[in-house]
């Protein structure tokens, strides 16, 4: 299928799940991720003639999700923590320990500044190289590396401080 033949509805159907996962990784909350993606789809629909004619409209939507996340001023009024995805197969691992680790990871990620969180999600979840992340965020590749290094240092320091308190 050529990109010219791709309708808005087809693009939504083909990219919605991936964009929702990206939104979840960025926001840490499934409901906020849905709001984020819905906002992007509404904006994309208004500009569909231009977006639909692009070579990679899905990549453009991904950029819109990240930019919308970075610009959002809305904050959750409560400290909701998303539930982990259901476990498909039982393992010998303690489910409580795994859930605690996931909760800790979500909490630590959510405490990072938005740009640092976006860089980590794009680098480690979307598996994008620094050059693509830089282009997507509109910054230099060195800024991506700096944000990643600062985010990882913050995560290490926070984990070390928590371990010291135990």
Image (cartoon, rainbow, N blue to C red):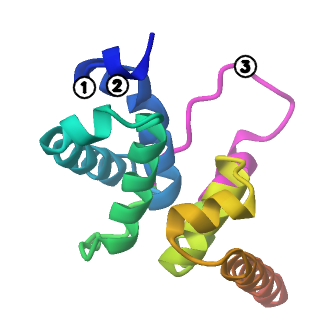
* Element on which disc 1 rests: helix
Disc 2 and disc 3: Cα gap in Å? 32 Å
The disc, 1 or 3, on the residue closer to the chain's N-terminal end is: 1
> On the rendered structure, is 113 left or right of 166?
left
Q: Which residue is the site of mark 1?
A: 8
- Above or below residue 64? Residue 18 is above
- Give the CA distance from mark 2 to mark 1: 5 Å
Place residue 27 in its image quadrant.
bottom left
Q: Quadrant of residue 16?
A: top left
Between 135 and 158, the one nearer to me in the picture:
135
The secondary structure type at the circle numbered 3 is: loop
Name the residue furthest top.
Answer: 1
The residue that label 3 is drawn on is 89
| Location of residue 42 in the rendering, given as x and y in whole percent from the top left corner | 17, 44
Q: Which residues are magenta?
A: 82-104
Mark 1 or 3, closer to the camera: 1
Q: Residue at x 24, y 20 (%)?
A: 9
Seen in the image, is 13 located left or right of residue 101? left
């Amino acid at each position: 299928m050529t990109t010219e033949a791709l309708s808005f509805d087809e693009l939504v159907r083909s990219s919605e799940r991936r964009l929702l996962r990206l939104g979840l990784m960025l926001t840490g909350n499934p409901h906020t991720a849905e709001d984020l993606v819905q906002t992007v789809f509404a904006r994309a629909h208004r500009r569909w003639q231009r977006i639909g004619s692009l070579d990679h409209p899905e990549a453009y939507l991904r950029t819109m999700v990240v930019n919308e996340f970075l610009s959002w001023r809305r904050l959750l009024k409560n400290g909701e923590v998303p539930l982990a995805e259901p476990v498909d197969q039982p393992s010998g691992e303690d489910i409580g320990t795994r859930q605690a680790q996931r909760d800790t990871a979500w909490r630590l990620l959510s405490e990072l500044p938005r740009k640092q969180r976006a860089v980590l999600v794009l680098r480690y979840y979307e598996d994008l190289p620094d050059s693509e992340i830089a282009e997507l965020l509109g910054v230099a590749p060195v800024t991506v590396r700096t944000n990643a290094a600062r985010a990882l240092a913050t995560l290490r320091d926070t984990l070390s401080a928590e371990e010291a308190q135990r």
